[in-house]
Amino acid sequence: MTPALIRGPRASQDTVRALVEGLAHDAGRSGFELEPSQRQAARRLATLGAQVTGRRRTLSRKTPRSLYLHGPVGRGKTWLMDSFYGRLDARKRRVHFHDFFRKLHSGTHGFDAGNGTAIQQSVDALLADIDVLFFDEFHVHDVGDGMFMARLLRSAAQRRIPLVVTSNYAPDDLLPNPLWHEHFLPTIEAIKEMMDIVEINGPSDFRRFPAAGTSPSAGFEAFRSGRIVSPGTARQLGRLGLFRPQPAQSRVLSPTTQPIVVKNSDPDLLWVAFGELCGGLTSTSDFLALAETFKTWIIDDVPSPADGDPASAPAWQRFSNVVDVLYDQDITLFLIGAGPLDWDLEAPGSVLPVDLARIASRLSLLGRSDADEALAREGAAGS
């Protein structure tokens, strides 16, 4: 037996051990300890890391199994991915769900289809010159996006490129719309065939209820500086330095192809009504384009999530996408509505999006100015 064959497994074990210890060290530096399901995911990530780096040394053509991390919001899936990404010594690329689809859709217009489909060329560009692809916040609500994902999975398998995916959904729960779910079943089966499925299901949502001394939700300072304001009196808004725009300040913006009438678009600040932003034909591409220009968003006339109007379901799904984009881009968000503006609802027949828990978790980072506070302040001012 040659020395190389002796050293190979030992080197792999050392790599796994070093990566697990590194992830645990990063957790300790952030002020918390990995709970059992996080430790299980850390070990699986470390094994993948050892396989990826070992394959480059040995020129092995065997593809390491991809990894699908899923579980409730705030359990540290993205934190683990980012820590592992930072420690992995390999050619790598990390993409976020919304940013991926924006680039993919724009990429279909930027490639010549003469040497294959434009979509395939865009996917090839995403996978070019890497050993592993990291895909954060994976969820599918549109059959067209589902088709893109199927193409990505096939291409990654052909190129022998493993994926690390985080999601709030188990694979069987992707594309939950019953009208389209059956069409996505082959891709779901491909995910389960290609990937090891690991659930991170600790008892705490660290983003909302961090344990003493923990800080896994640190960062996103701009987003966290926003507020949910109800009922939105002039006095409430004035204390926040917000003043309702005059009609003359209204503008029509066309971030992509869909015109949007906004109440104000001063440099760096966007003020728009919920119905205009979410009630029409806007898409995530529009939200991403606007986020590149405006770093403070004010969305007013936000209806109460408790209203339960079935016709509002598409608008709430767009609102969910808005929150995703603004959180990921760390943009300040003010939500103004008559109220109650409470997304922690489990009401039967709710029209809120199926990924409500993720949105409620993110909105919980915002401060609140509610009706009781407004009355108390105004009473104190008049006494």
Image: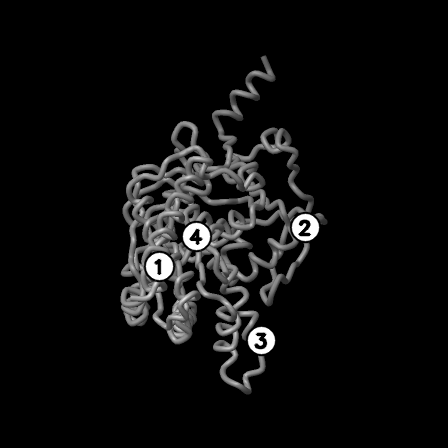
Total tally of numbered discs in the picture? 4
224 above or below 144?
Answer: above
The answer to the question of whether label 2 and label 3 lie on touching residues, with beta carbons closer than 8 A, is no
Q: Please state which of the two labelled residues, at mark 4 or mark 1, is closer to the viewer.
A: 1
Q: Secondary structure at mark 4?
A: helix
Q: Position of residue 18 (x, y in %)?
A: 40, 47
Give residue 345's position: percent from left, percent from top. 34, 41
Q: Nearer the viewer, mark 3 or mark 4?
A: 3
> SS for tag 3?
loop
Direction from residue 344 to residue 322 in the image, left or right = right
Seen from the viewer's position, the closer of residues 4 and 275 is 4
Question: Spatial distance from mark 4 to mark 1, Cα to Cα?
Answer: 56 Å
Of the two numbered discs 3 and 1 in the rendering, the one whose residue sits closer to the viewer: 1
Amino acid carrying label 4: it is Trp
Ranked by sequence position, the earlier of labels 2 and 3 is 3
> Mark 1 packing: few (<14 Cα in 10 Å), some, or many (20+)?
few
State the residue at coordinates (57%, 57%): 288
Where disc 2 sits, the SS reads loop
Instruction: Report the Cα–Cα distance between label 3 and label 4.
Output: 29 Å
User: Which sits earlier in the primary sequence, circle 3 or circle 1?
Assistant: 1
Residue drawn at the location 37% of the way across and 61% of the way down: 51
Which labelled disc corresponds to residue 7? 1
Q: Which residue is mark 2?
A: 265
The residue beneath circle 4 is: 316
